[in-house]
Amino acid sequence: MRPVLTLVTSDAVSFEQLVRVVGIAAGALGAGLVVQLREKTASREALVASARALRSVLGAAKLVVNGADLEASLAVARASDAHGVHVNAAEVARGGVARARIALGARAFVSAATHDDDDVRRAAEEGASAVLVSPIFATPGKGPPRGVGALTSARAVVDATSSPPLVFALGGVDAANAAACAAAGADGVAVIRA
Protein backbone atom coordinates (compact mmCIF):
# COMPACT_ATOMS: atom_id res chain seq x y z
CA MET A 1 0.00 0.00 0.00
CA ARG A 2 1.17 3.53 -0.79
CA PRO A 3 1.06 6.16 1.96
CA VAL A 4 -2.19 8.14 2.06
CA LEU A 5 -1.75 10.01 5.34
CA THR A 6 1.17 11.91 6.81
CA LEU A 7 0.87 12.75 10.49
CA VAL A 8 3.14 15.67 11.35
CA THR A 9 3.93 15.74 15.05
CA SER A 10 3.23 18.79 17.17
CA ASP A 11 4.66 19.71 20.54
CA ALA A 12 1.14 20.86 21.47
CA VAL A 13 0.50 17.17 22.24
CA SER A 14 2.35 15.31 24.99
CA PHE A 15 4.82 12.76 23.70
CA GLU A 16 2.98 9.96 25.53
CA GLN A 17 -0.27 10.94 23.79
CA LEU A 18 1.57 11.19 20.47
CA VAL A 19 3.00 7.67 20.76
CA ARG A 20 -0.47 6.34 21.61
CA VAL A 21 -2.13 8.08 18.63
CA VAL A 22 0.65 7.05 16.26
CA GLY A 23 0.32 3.44 17.41
CA ILE A 24 -3.43 3.49 16.74
CA ALA A 25 -2.99 5.12 13.32
CA ALA A 26 -0.20 2.70 12.38
CA GLY A 27 -2.40 -0.23 13.38
CA ALA A 28 -5.22 1.04 11.18
CA LEU A 29 -3.22 2.21 8.14
CA GLY A 30 0.00 0.18 8.17
CA ALA A 31 2.07 1.12 5.13
CA GLY A 32 -0.51 3.79 4.32
CA LEU A 33 0.91 6.02 7.06
CA VAL A 34 3.96 8.28 7.24
CA VAL A 35 4.81 9.93 10.55
CA GLN A 36 6.89 13.08 10.30
CA LEU A 37 8.73 13.76 13.55
CA ARG A 38 8.80 17.55 13.44
CA GLU A 39 10.86 19.10 16.19
CA LYS A 40 12.91 22.22 15.62
CA THR A 41 14.34 22.84 19.10
CA ALA A 42 15.10 19.45 20.69
CA SER A 43 18.65 18.22 21.04
CA ARG A 44 19.93 15.51 18.70
CA GLU A 45 19.86 13.00 21.58
CA ALA A 46 16.24 13.85 22.41
CA LEU A 47 15.23 13.56 18.76
CA VAL A 48 16.92 10.18 18.41
CA ALA A 49 15.14 8.93 21.54
CA SER A 50 11.78 10.23 20.26
CA ALA A 51 12.35 8.70 16.84
CA ARG A 52 13.22 5.33 18.35
CA ALA A 53 10.12 5.41 20.56
CA LEU A 54 7.91 6.18 17.56
CA ARG A 55 9.67 3.53 15.45
CA SER A 56 8.73 0.93 18.07
CA VAL A 57 4.98 1.44 17.43
CA LEU A 58 5.02 1.99 13.66
CA GLY A 59 4.90 -1.52 12.26
CA ALA A 60 4.77 -1.11 8.45
CA ALA A 61 4.33 2.69 8.63
CA LYS A 62 7.22 5.02 7.80
CA LEU A 63 9.02 7.53 10.02
CA VAL A 64 10.70 10.63 8.60
CA VAL A 65 12.65 13.24 10.53
CA ASN A 66 12.03 16.98 10.16
CA GLY A 67 14.61 18.73 12.31
CA ALA A 68 16.15 22.17 12.61
CA ASP A 69 18.15 21.75 9.41
CA LEU A 70 18.77 19.05 6.82
CA GLU A 71 22.13 17.91 8.17
CA ALA A 72 20.68 17.49 11.66
CA SER A 73 17.70 15.59 10.24
CA LEU A 74 20.00 13.28 8.29
CA ALA A 75 22.08 12.57 11.40
CA VAL A 76 18.97 11.79 13.49
CA ALA A 77 17.51 9.60 10.72
CA ARG A 78 20.70 7.55 10.53
CA ALA A 79 21.04 7.23 14.32
CA SER A 80 17.41 6.20 14.84
CA ASP A 81 16.96 3.98 11.78
CA ALA A 82 14.19 6.26 10.50
CA HIS A 83 12.94 5.66 6.97
CA GLY A 84 13.95 9.11 5.74
CA VAL A 85 13.75 12.86 6.15
CA HIS A 86 11.53 15.81 5.29
CA VAL A 87 13.26 18.64 3.42
CA ASN A 88 12.00 22.15 4.17
CA ALA A 89 11.28 24.65 1.37
CA ALA A 90 14.51 26.61 1.89
CA GLU A 91 16.55 23.41 1.56
CA VAL A 92 14.50 22.31 -1.49
CA ALA A 93 15.63 25.53 -3.22
CA ARG A 94 19.27 24.64 -2.41
CA GLY A 95 19.22 21.08 -3.76
CA GLY A 96 18.32 19.49 -0.42
CA VAL A 97 16.28 16.66 -1.90
CA ALA A 98 19.23 15.51 -3.99
CA ARG A 99 21.56 15.76 -0.97
CA ALA A 100 19.14 13.74 1.16
CA ARG A 101 18.74 11.11 -1.56
CA ILE A 102 22.52 10.76 -1.88
CA ALA A 103 22.99 10.60 1.90
CA LEU A 104 20.23 8.06 2.61
CA GLY A 105 20.05 6.07 -0.60
CA ALA A 106 17.41 5.09 -3.13
CA ARG A 107 15.15 3.29 -0.65
CA ALA A 108 14.78 6.22 1.76
CA PHE A 109 11.51 8.14 1.97
CA VAL A 110 12.31 11.78 1.24
CA SER A 111 9.44 14.25 1.43
CA ALA A 112 9.70 17.90 0.47
CA ALA A 113 7.86 21.09 1.43
CA THR A 114 6.66 22.85 -1.70
CA HIS A 115 5.02 26.25 -1.94
CA ASP A 116 4.89 26.66 -5.72
CA ASP A 117 5.25 24.63 -8.91
CA ASP A 118 8.98 25.40 -9.17
CA ASP A 119 9.50 23.74 -5.77
CA VAL A 120 7.40 20.76 -6.90
CA ARG A 121 9.39 20.39 -10.12
CA ARG A 122 12.76 20.70 -8.38
CA ALA A 123 11.82 18.17 -5.69
CA ALA A 124 10.45 15.70 -8.25
CA GLU A 125 13.51 15.99 -10.49
CA GLU A 126 15.83 15.44 -7.51
CA GLY A 127 14.08 12.23 -6.49
CA ALA A 128 11.56 13.16 -3.79
CA SER A 129 9.30 10.34 -2.65
CA ALA A 130 6.54 12.85 -1.85
CA VAL A 131 5.83 16.56 -2.13
CA LEU A 132 3.74 18.31 0.51
CA VAL A 133 1.88 21.10 -1.28
CA SER A 134 0.86 23.90 1.05
CA PRO A 135 -0.98 25.76 2.32
CA ILE A 136 -4.10 24.41 0.65
CA PHE A 137 -6.63 25.83 3.13
CA ALA A 138 -6.33 28.58 5.73
CA THR A 139 -4.00 27.65 8.56
CA PRO A 140 -2.34 29.81 11.23
CA GLY A 141 0.95 31.43 10.23
CA LYS A 142 1.29 29.92 6.76
CA GLY A 143 0.20 32.74 4.48
CA PRO A 144 -2.75 32.85 2.12
CA PRO A 145 -4.26 29.51 1.15
CA ARG A 146 -3.46 28.31 -2.37
CA GLY A 147 -6.65 26.26 -2.77
CA VAL A 148 -7.10 22.82 -4.29
CA GLY A 149 -6.03 24.18 -7.68
CA ALA A 150 -2.46 24.03 -6.36
CA LEU A 151 -2.87 20.26 -6.07
CA THR A 152 -4.11 19.94 -9.65
CA SER A 153 -1.14 21.97 -10.82
CA ALA A 154 1.31 19.94 -8.72
CA ARG A 155 -0.16 16.71 -10.10
CA ALA A 156 0.47 17.92 -13.67
CA VAL A 157 4.05 18.86 -12.78
CA VAL A 158 4.93 15.53 -11.14
CA ASP A 159 3.20 13.48 -13.82
CA ALA A 160 5.53 15.09 -16.38
CA THR A 161 8.61 13.75 -14.56
CA SER A 162 10.23 10.36 -15.04
CA SER A 163 9.62 9.20 -11.45
CA PRO A 164 6.61 11.08 -10.09
CA PRO A 165 6.52 11.52 -6.32
CA LEU A 166 3.35 11.27 -4.28
CA VAL A 167 1.40 14.53 -3.86
CA PHE A 168 0.13 15.36 -0.36
CA ALA A 169 -2.13 18.26 0.58
CA LEU A 170 -1.05 20.19 3.69
CA GLY A 171 -2.49 23.19 5.46
CA GLY A 172 -5.92 23.31 7.01
CA VAL A 173 -6.76 19.80 5.82
CA ASP A 174 -9.34 17.91 7.88
CA ALA A 175 -11.98 15.20 7.49
CA ALA A 176 -14.41 17.66 5.91
CA ASN A 177 -12.14 18.73 3.04
CA ALA A 178 -9.81 15.75 2.47
CA ALA A 179 -12.02 14.36 -0.32
CA ALA A 180 -11.74 17.65 -2.22
CA CYS A 181 -7.94 17.28 -2.04
CA ALA A 182 -8.12 13.77 -3.51
CA ALA A 183 -10.48 14.96 -6.25
CA ALA A 184 -7.97 17.69 -7.15
CA GLY A 185 -5.13 15.18 -7.61
CA ALA A 186 -3.63 14.55 -4.16
CA ASP A 187 -2.51 11.00 -3.36
CA GLY A 188 -3.02 11.76 0.31
CA VAL A 189 -3.16 14.40 2.99
CA ALA A 190 -0.77 15.65 5.65
CA VAL A 191 -2.14 16.88 8.93
CA ILE A 192 -0.81 18.57 12.04
CA ARG A 193 -3.78 19.87 14.04
CA ALA A 194 -6.36 17.45 12.62
Image: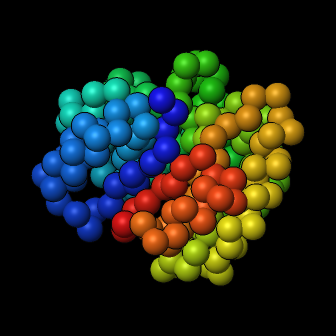
Q: Give how far across and how far down residue 6 sits, in percent.
A: 45, 48
Front-lying residue, 67 or 84:
84
Front-lying residue, 81 or 27:
27
- Can you name the residue that lies furthest to the left here? 16
Q: Is residue 188 above or below residue 149?
A: above
Residue at the image position 49 percent from the left and 44 percent from the top:
4
Residue at the image position 48 percent from the left and 29 percent from the top:
1
How many marks are shown on the rendered structure?
0
**Quarter in which the C terminus is drawn:** bottom left
Residue at the image position 68 percent from the left and 68 percent from the top:
148
Image quadrant in which you'd find residue 26: top left
Q: Is residue 78 above or below residue 11?
A: above
Colouring of the image = rainbow
Q: Is residue 85 above or below residue 193?
A: above
Q: Is residue 96 above or below residue 115?
A: above
Q: Give how far across and how far down residue 90 sits, in percent.
A: 66, 55
